[in-house]
Image (spheres, rainbow, N blue to C red):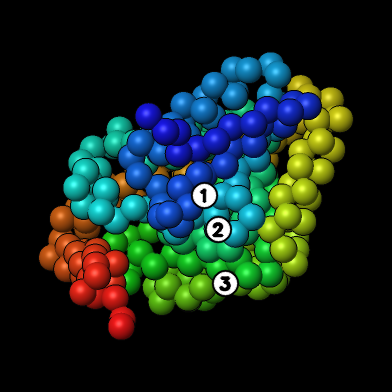
């Protein structure tokens, strides 16, 4: 079976790359499970000191694979996507994101849990949950207002507005912006190597201190969001919105649906 996430360990830096270009790196249940397992293994691997998440030089991820999502929706709190969230928030080692191009839905909420986020100028961060009849996930309803204030968070979560690279840096969702994917990926690796040169126990303990004050509230928020997400996914609003997108894509990709 072809792996949809590539892993590359070099000089203590583990790079995990979404590798589903034909679907714009859309995440399905198998990818959630694989990513969770890779992160757990990295936490226990003394050879891996820092983890980089990437989608390659042109697209981070287009979010959930909607066809897979409709066929195998989360029905309980141990569903693959929710399990990944648990793994990420309890990760012991530094996590860096290199975001080149689109980062939709969980592709953006995942960034809230990274220690450094590098983006390209053409990055597009967007959380269209309400547009799809759904609700926020991965603690976004807690973390975004704390980071951006209520008004800015509302524009992103209620309206589903998108942020390009420079705007993401300006509002604090990303650290630095780069002209192209290759430069962005190189910067992420350079930062990872800088972290590896530091005293590792002190680094991880400081990272834990940074995250600890919100941990209890974050876990409670994620649980509440996920329970509502399951309910919303079965709502007429969400079913209509998701099926409309899937059917539109099917029409576009069929020979009859293609423009002449």
Work out whether mark 2 precedes mark 1 in sequence or the reverse, and give the earlier one.
2
State the residue position of label 3. 163
Q: Secondary structure at mark 3?
A: strand
Question: Residue sitting at 77 percent across and 48 percent down?
Answer: 186
Q: Secondary structure at mark 2?
A: loop
Res 78 quadrant in image: top left
Question: Residue sitting at 52 percent across and 28 percent down?
Answer: 38
Crowding near the residue tagged with mark 1, few <14, some 14–19, many ≥20 C-alpha atoms within 10 Å? many
For this orientation, the residue located farthest to the left is 236
Q: Secondary structure at mark 1?
A: helix
State the residue position of label 1. 110
Residues at discs 3 and 2 in contact (Cβ within 8 Å): no
Q: Nearer the viewer, residue 142 or 198?
A: 198
The image shows residue 85 at horizontal and vertical percentages of: 44, 39
Q: How many marks?
A: 3
Work out whether mark 3 precedes mark 1 in sequence or the reverse, and give the earlier one.
1
Residues at discs 3 and 1 in contact (Cβ within 8 Å): no
Q: Nearer the viewer, residue 166 or 18?
A: 18
| Numbered tag placed on residue 118 in the rendering | none
Report the Cα–Cα distance between label 2 and label 1.
15 Å
Would residue 130 be found to the left or right of residue 11 on screen? left
Report the Cα–Cα distance between label 3 and label 1.
15 Å
Residue 209 visible at all: no
Would residue 36 be found to the left or right of residue 124 on screen? left
Crowding near the residue tagged with mark 2, few <14, some 14–19, many ≥20 C-alpha atoms within 10 Å? many
Q: Quadrant of the N terminus?
A: top left
The image shows residue 91 at horizontal and vertical percentages of: 57, 31
Work out whether mark 3 precedes mark 2 in sequence or the reverse, and give the earlier one.
2
State the residue position of label 2. 59
Q: Quadrant of the C terminus?
A: bottom left
């Amino acid at each position: 079976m072809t792996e949809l996430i590539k892993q590359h360990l070099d000089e203590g830096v583990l790079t995990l790359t979404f590798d589903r270009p034909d679907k714009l790196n859309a995440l399905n249940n198998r990818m959630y499970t694989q990513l969770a397992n890779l992160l757990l293994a990295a936490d226990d691997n003394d050879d891996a000191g820092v983890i980089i998440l990437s989608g390659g030089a042109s697209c981070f991820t287009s979010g959930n694979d909607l066809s897979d999502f409709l066929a195998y929706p989360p029905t309980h709190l141990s569903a693959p996507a929710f399990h990944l969230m648990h793994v990420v928030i309890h990760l012991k080692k530094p996590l860096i994101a290199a975001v080149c191009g689109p980062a939709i839905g969980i592709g953006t909420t995942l960034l809230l849990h990274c220690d450094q986020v590098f983006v390209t100028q053409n990055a597009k961060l967007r959380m269209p949950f309400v547009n799809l009849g759904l609700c926020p996930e991965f603690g976004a309803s807690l973390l975004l207002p704390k980071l951006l204030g209520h008004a800015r968070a509302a524009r992103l979560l209620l309206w589903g507005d998108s942020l390009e690279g420079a705007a993401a840096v300006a509002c604090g969702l990303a650290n630095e912006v780069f002209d192209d994917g290759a430069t962005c990926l190189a910067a992420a690796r350079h930062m990872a190597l800088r972290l590896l040169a530091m005293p590792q126990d002190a680094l991880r303990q400081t990272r834990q201190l940074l995250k600890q004050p919100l941990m209890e509230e974050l876990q409670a928020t994620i649980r509440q969001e996920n329970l509502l997400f399951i309910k919303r996914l079965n709502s007429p609003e969400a079913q209509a919105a998701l099926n409309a997108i899937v059917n539109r894509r099917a029409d576009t990709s069929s020979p009859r649906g293609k423009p002449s």
